[in-house]
Amino acid sequence: MKMRINAREYAWGDVSIVLFGQPVLGIRGIDYNQKKNKEALYAAGRYPKSIQHGRRESEGTLTILQSELIALNKSAIAAGYTDILDVDMDIQVAYADASGITTIDRIVKASFTELPQALKEGDMNQEIAIPFVALDIEFNITKA
């Protein structure tokens, strides 16, 4: 039996990102990844005997407009934090297709590590890339 696979890829317009339970509209990009340390174990002979598995690391970068960063920072301060750097939060990245099926990646307890600012002559807006670390990333949670 042949299986049909829809070759359509998600576009930026298919993605929504939720922080603090609310969609973030001033988002310009997100990248995130999970790494696992691995090492070949050598013993007698020239070839490794096994692959050793170590710790996992989750990290990424959220790129937002300055106005969105100001709003997030104000929310953090209103909640009693010094600024957004003190907040650990889940980030939900939802990919929706035309059939109504949504696939969600949940970035667990993300915490921003820097609060960079940059603007130069000729810029018509300020786009800020904020790196984060996280406890885990749960990939491909599907909702119909």
Image: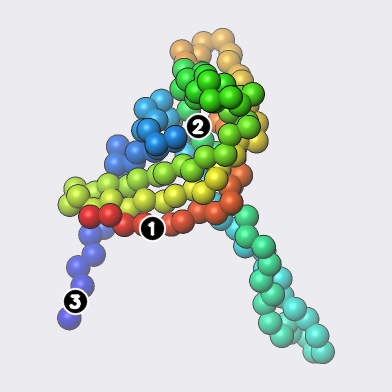
Q: Position of residue 68 (x, y in %)?
A: 46, 22
Q: Earlier in the sequence, mark 3 or mark 2?
A: 3
Residue lying at the far bottom of the rendered structure: 44
Check disc 2 and report the residue beneath it.
63
Image vertical order of residue 57 relative to residue 40, above or below: above
Q: Is residue 14 left or right of residue 35?
A: left
| Quadrant of the drawing holding the N terminus | bottom left
| Disc 1, SS | strand
Check disc 3 and report the residue beneath it.
2
| Disc 3, SS | loop
> Which residue is at 58% across, 34% downward?
87
Image vertical order of residue 133 relative to residue 84, above or below: below
Residue lying at the far right of the rendered structure: 44
Residue 116 visible in the shown view:
no
Between residues 45 and 109, which one lies in front from this camera angle? 109
Q: Position of residue 126 (x, y in %)?
A: 51, 18
**Pointers 1 and 2 in contact (C-beta within 8 Å):** no
Between residues 123 and 116, which one lies in front from this camera angle? 116
Badge 1 local density, few (<14 within 10 Å), some, or many (20+)?
some
Image vertical order of residue 76 relative to residue 20, above or below: above
**Pointers 3 and 1 in contact (C-beta within 8 Å):** no
Check disc 1 and report the residue beneath it.
140
Counting every numbered tag in the picture gives 3
Between residues 101 and 111, which one lies in front from this camera angle? 111
**Residue kind at label 1, given as amino acid type:** Asn
> Which residue is at 31% across, 57% downward?
142
